[in-house]
Amino acid sequence: MEKRPSWQQYFMQMAFLASTRSTCLRRQVGAVLVKDNQILSTGYNGSPKGVRHCAEVGCLRKKNNVPSGQMHELCRGLHAEQNAIIQAGLNGSSARGATLYCTHQPCSICAKMIINAEIQTVYVAEKYPDELAEKLLAEAGVELILYNPQTGKMKKLI
């Protein structure tokens, strides 16, 4: 019998699965919002409902040479974390006290949403260059943990 995955491995694998639905041309990100080891919602980065995907119309950030980690508002898409929080709300679930598993570290915009949604812990598989996000999460007392899904090793970032 194969070793059973930890909860962190299990939910992070689901975040990576969610990322396969991404329509972003630059970075595929997935997120899973969990409470009491039950999935509240999932999200991936891509255009809003009813809006053409970047694959159809091109990447606005690439066209304007916007560096990673800057000017997040110049994008057609929503981030995976935003979509997970929105989907939980649409389905009548509160994110208060939940844990977010995300393939990449949240940006400062997502960090503010995570704080106001009262999410307590965020596990990420990859860091992202946004110091303000880390400062905001730290100030609000949100735990940020770098998690390696292959080894199971964790490192508390804040």
Image (cartoon, rainbow, N blue to C red):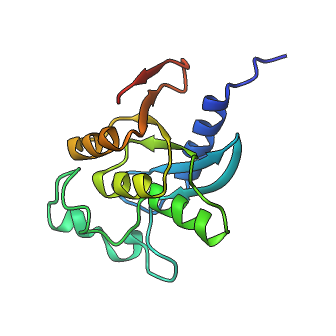
Left or right: residue 94 compared with residue 68: right
Left or right: residue 147 compared with residue 138: right
Quadrant of the image occupied by residue 99: top right
Q: Which residue is found at the position 22% from the left and 62% from the top?
A: 62
Q: How many marks on residues? A: 0
- Between residue 119 and residue 39, name the one nearer to us: 119
Q: Of all residues shown, which one is farthest toward the bottom?
A: 50
Q: Taking 149 as reference, is 106 above or below it?
A: below
Left or right: residue 134 compared with residue 43: left
Residue 24 spot, x, y in % from top left:
40, 60
Residue 49 spot, x, y in % from top left:
52, 78
Quadrant of the image occupied by residue 59: bottom left
Residue 157 spot, x, y in % from top left:
35, 28
Q: Taking 43 as reference, is 152 above or below it?
A: above
Left or right: residue 91 compared with residue 147: right
Q: Taking 16 as reference, is 57 above or below it?
A: below
Q: Which residue is found at the position 39% from the left and 35% from the top?
A: 126
Residue 158 spot, x, y in % from top left:
35, 30
- Between residue 136 and residue 15, name the one nearer to us: 136
Q: Of all residues shown, which one is farthest toward the right?
A: 1
Q: In the rendered view of the protein, which quadrant contains the N terminus?
A: top right
Q: Which residue is found at the position 43% from the left and 35% from the top?
A: 143
Q: Which residue is found at the position 61% from the left and 60% from the top?
A: 94
Q: Taking 34 as reference, is 63 above or below it?
A: below
